[in-house]
Structure formats: C-alpha cells, structure tokens
Image (cartoon, helix red, strand yellow):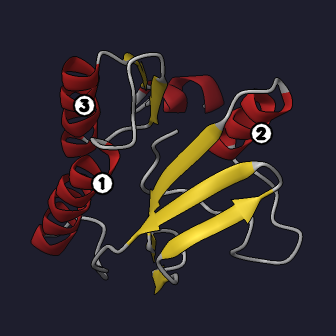
C-alpha cells in the first residue's frame, strides 16, 4: 500500500481509517501481509510525524522522512513529493518481490512512476487507484 498523504491511525486517538487504511485493514484481515508506505509529513495537519516503522493491528506502516510545506500549491510541495518518491523507490525496491501487489492510492506523478518502475524491475503486480472527481464532483452536489 503506497499513499504518501493520508491520516494514519496513530495521528489522533480513535482516528478512523481513510480509504487506503481501510483497504490495508481488509487485506490484512484476509491474511495478506500488508506494508503501508507513507510520508512523515502530515499533509492535512501540516505537521511532521516521526519517521520509522509503526505497527497497526497486523499492518506494518513504513513512514519515510519527507520535507514539509505550508502551501498546497508550491515548489516546496513538488520538491517534497519528488524527494519522498525517490526515497520510497530506493527503500521499496529491495523489499517488494515478484509475487507482491503494489497498490498505489491517489498517487502523485512521482509516486506512480516510482511504483511502476519497481513493478517493472521486480515483476510485482501494480494497481494505481485514481479517483479524482474534479470538477465533476460539483455537478453532483449542485
């Protein structure tokens, strides 16, 4: 599971899982070994998390150090995404094996590229989960 910007169960007490976390939990409950890769920078609260490994139920969460940014539309955010994706690529390349499935949720261009390259090199299957409904979402809510 690769999602660089999602709230983690450890971010707050009684934090509900978002889509990636929920899918990771479903996979884990179905006896699949789940590694969840994410960034140390919490995009939604604009705070740094401690990088390293956490365990949530039977899910291993690998938190890779990422640089923070204040503005969602900024050069710093692009740099943050690029550096995180490069770091993820370097770490995951030696972890992901042929029979694994890489599930990259709401990917940035750089994280989807890193996942695709790892998939090609390792022979692992790749699922890119795109679900951006911009601007169609406004049609449905008007």
Residue 131 visible from this viewpoint: no
Q: Residues within 10 Å of mark 3 (few under 14, many from 20)?
A: many
Report the disc number at residue 118: 3
Please give the label number shown on residue 67.
none
User: Which residue occupies 23% across, 60% down?
Assistant: 87
Q: Residues within 10 Å of mark 1 (few under 14, many from 20)?
A: some
In the rendering, at what x and y percent does residue 56 appear? 76, 59
Residue with the mark numbered 2: 25
* Image: 117 above or below 7: above
Residue 30, position in %: x, y? Answer: 82, 23
Q: Indicate which label's residue lies in the foreground, 3 or 2.
A: 3
Cα–Cα gap, marks 3 and 2:
23 Å
Whether pointer 1 and pointer 2 mark residues with C-beta atoms closer than 8 Å, the reply is no
Q: x, y percentage for residue 89?
A: 23, 47
Q: Secondary structure at mark 2?
A: helix
**Is residue 28 toward the left or the right of residue 98 in the image?**
right
Residue 73 visible: yes
| Element assignment for label 1 | helix
Give the answer, above or below, for where 26 lies relative to 49: above
Choose top left, top right, bottom left or bottom right for residue 82.
Answer: bottom left
Task: Kindly identify which residue carries mark 1.
Answer: 91
Circle 3/circle 2 CB separation < 8 Å: no
- In this view, 115 is above or below 78: above
């Amino acid at each position: 599971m690769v999602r660089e910007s999602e709230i983690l169960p450890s971010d707050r007490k009684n934090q509900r899982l978002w889509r990636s976390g929920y899918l990771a939990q479903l996979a884990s409950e179905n006896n699949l070994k789940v590694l969840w890769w994410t960034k140390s920078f919490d995009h939604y609260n604009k705070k740094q998390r401690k990088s390293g490994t956490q365990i949530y139920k039977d899910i291993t969460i690998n938190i890779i150090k990422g640089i923070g940014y204040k503005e969602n539309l900024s050069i710093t955010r692009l740099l943050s995404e690029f550096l995180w994706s490069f770091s993820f690529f370097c770490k995951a390349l030696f972890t992901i094996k042929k029979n694994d499935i890489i599930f990259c949720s709401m990917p940035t261009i750089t994280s989807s590229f890193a996942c695709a390259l790892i998939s090609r090199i390792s022979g692992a299957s790749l699922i890119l989960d795109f679900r951006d409904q911009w601007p169609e979402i406004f049609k449905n809510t008007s």
